[in-house]
Amino acid sequence: ANSGQPSPLGAGSAITLGSATLQYSGATAASTNRTITLTGGGTIDVSNSAGQLTLSGTLSGSGQTLTKTGGGTLEISGSATLGTLRFMAGTTKFAGNASLTTSRIDNRGSGVVFSIADNASITVSSYMVFGDASGASITINQSGGAVTNLGTVNDPAGNNMSNRWGHWAGGTTTYNLSGGVLNLLAAPLYLSWDGPATLNISGGTANILGINMGYGGRTNPSTISLTGGRLNIGSAGII
């Protein structure tokens, strides 16, 4: 399905996706290097759990929301610029030299997997919120690359924070860092809110301004497991 080649996506060199769904239903791996431009809140659905769709071209949608649905795998190995990246189902993977610049990352579905590998670079400017709906569960597996949130919002009394994992009840958030770098230096991490959250570090480096494990008397499980790698905690400490 590469640029100019006949395929179920047509033979053009670019795809424009508005407030609509682009579905890949195959049970095998497919890829395209075409430029995809979001002009509205678009959805990419990899509907077959055995299927994988790899996007190696440019994904352009500044200010727009891209939602991943379906039980299969969406792999991004090119560059992407978005307003919000939202996970509802299945696996989304950034690998190779992939790059993502976005204002927000969240998940509102259950059984979601978000993977960052190789030299992939994820840069968030405002919010990284996991478990962002009732029953929403996610596992984040970072084996390489860099994940950075530059968001500075830290207003837990106003229910507004840049880094919040385990936001809603009924789901779980698990972040597995085995390589690469996780940078949360502009605002503290609220590790569990109304749902449980876990940070497992077995490799790589986590640079975190601070970790709050039970704001306002919350008693949901909040776990840090350090079996390798390095955890650097800043001035906000661990409370």
Image (cartoon, rainbow, N blue to C red):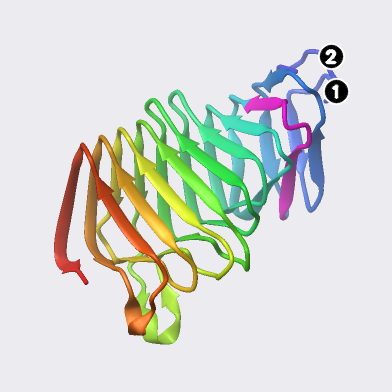
Residue at x-position 68% and y-position 35%: 36
Do tag 1 and tag 2 residues touch (Cβ < 8 Å)? yes
Depth check: give the residue in front, 145 or 174: 174
Left or right: residue 123 versus residue 67 is left
Residue at x-position 80% and y-position 24%: 26
- Residue 45 covered by magenta stretch: yes
Left or right: residue 13 versus residue 158 is right
Residue 6's disc number? 2
Residue at x-position 72% and y-position 41%: 44
Residue 54 % position (x, y):
63, 25
Position of 174 relative to 159 (above/below): above
Magenta range is 41-54
Q: Quadrant of residue 193?
A: bottom left
The amino acid sitting under disc 1 is Gly
Is disc 2 surrounded by few (<14), some (14 to 19) or many (20+) residues within 10 Å?
few
Residue 162 % position (x, y):
40, 66
Left or right: residue 235 versus residue 10 is left
SS class, disc 1: loop
Is disc 1 surrounded by few (<14), some (14 to 19) or many (20+) residues within 10 Å?
some
If the image is split into quadrants, where does the N terminus sit? top right
SS class, disc 2: loop
If the image is split into quadrants, where does the C terminus sit? bottom left
The amino acid sitting under disc 2 is Pro
Residue 132 % position (x, y):
56, 64
Depth check: give the residue in front, 177 or 180: 177
Q: Quadrant of residue 141?
A: top left
Residue at x-position 53% and y-position 44%: 81
- Residue 233 covered by magenta stretch: no
**Farthest left residue in view:** 235
Q: Which residue is mark 1?
A: 10
Residue 7 % position (x, y):
84, 17
